[in-house]
């Protein structure tokens, strides 16, 4: 059986007003660098754990947790491990718009 891969779907491609990332991170410490979007992003954690930085706060997220990042708020996450981090990230826009800050 192969591992699921991170998969991005922009809403305009499928007739939706939201875009989705099916996130799958195996390596502890891995995750995107600090960035922001001009819209809200919702993280629905399915498996594993990650440390989220949202604005000036840090919060650990695990299975069943839902975290929300407000528009224009710098954020990032890193897998804590040892289990892979698996989640659905919902972008409230039909296209991904990302400003990388680091």
Image (cartoon, rainbow, N blue to C red):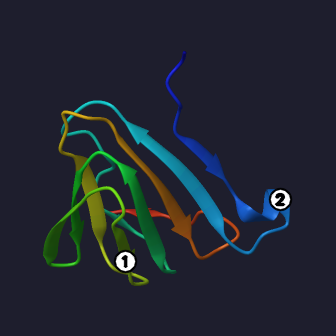
| Nearer the observer, 59 or 40 | 59
Q: Nearer the viewer, residue 62 or 31?
A: 62
Q: Residue at x 39, y 84 (%)?
A: 70
* Position in image of residue 71 (x %, y %): 43, 83
The residue positioned 45% from the left and 72% from the top of the image is 42
Q: CA distance from mark 1 to mark 2?
A: 24 Å
Residue 67 showing in the rendered view: yes
Q: Residue at x 38, y 77 (%)?
A: 68
Give the quarter of the image for residue 43.
bottom left
Residue 55 numbered mark, or none:
none
Percent coordinates x, y for residue 13 in the rendering: 81, 57
Q: Quadrant of residue 28?
A: top left
Q: Residue at x 54, y 15 (%)?
A: 1
In this rendered view, identify the residue nearer to me: 18 or 62.
62
Secondary structure, mark 1, is strand
Crowding near the residue tagged with mark 1, few <14, some 14–19, many ≥20 C-alpha atoms within 10 Å: many
Residue that protrudes farthest toward the right in the picture:
15
Mark 2 crowdedness (10 Å alpha carbons): few <14, some 14-19, many ≥20: few
Mark 1 highlights which residue?
A: 69
Report x, y in % for residue 11.
73, 64
Q: Are marks 1 and 2 in contact (CB under 8 Å)?
A: no
Residue 6 point in image, percent of width and height: 52, 39
For the C terminus, give its image quadrant: bottom left
Q: Secondary structure at mark 2?
A: helix
Quick one: 80 or 74, which is closer to the camera? 80
Q: Earlier in the sequence, mark 1 or mark 2?
A: 2
Q: How many marks?
A: 2
Q: With 3 as the anchor, is 33 left or right in this view?
A: left
Which residue matches tag 2? Answer: 14
Q: Is residue 64 left or right of residue 83?
A: right
Q: Residue furthest top?
A: 1
């Amino acid at each position: 059986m192969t591992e699921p891969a991170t998969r991005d779907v922009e809403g305009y491609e499928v007739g939706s007003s939201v875009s989705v990332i099916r996130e799958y991170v195996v390596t502890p410490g891995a995750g995107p660098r600090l960035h922001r979007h001009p819209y809200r992003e919702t993280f629905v954690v399915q498996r594993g754990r990650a440390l989220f930085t949202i604005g000036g706060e840090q919060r650990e997220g695990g299975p069943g947790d839902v975290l929300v990042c407000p528009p224009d708020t710098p954020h990032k996450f890193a897998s804590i491990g040892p289990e892979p981090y698996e989640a659905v990230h919902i972008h409230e826009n039909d296209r991904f718009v990302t400003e990388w800050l680091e």
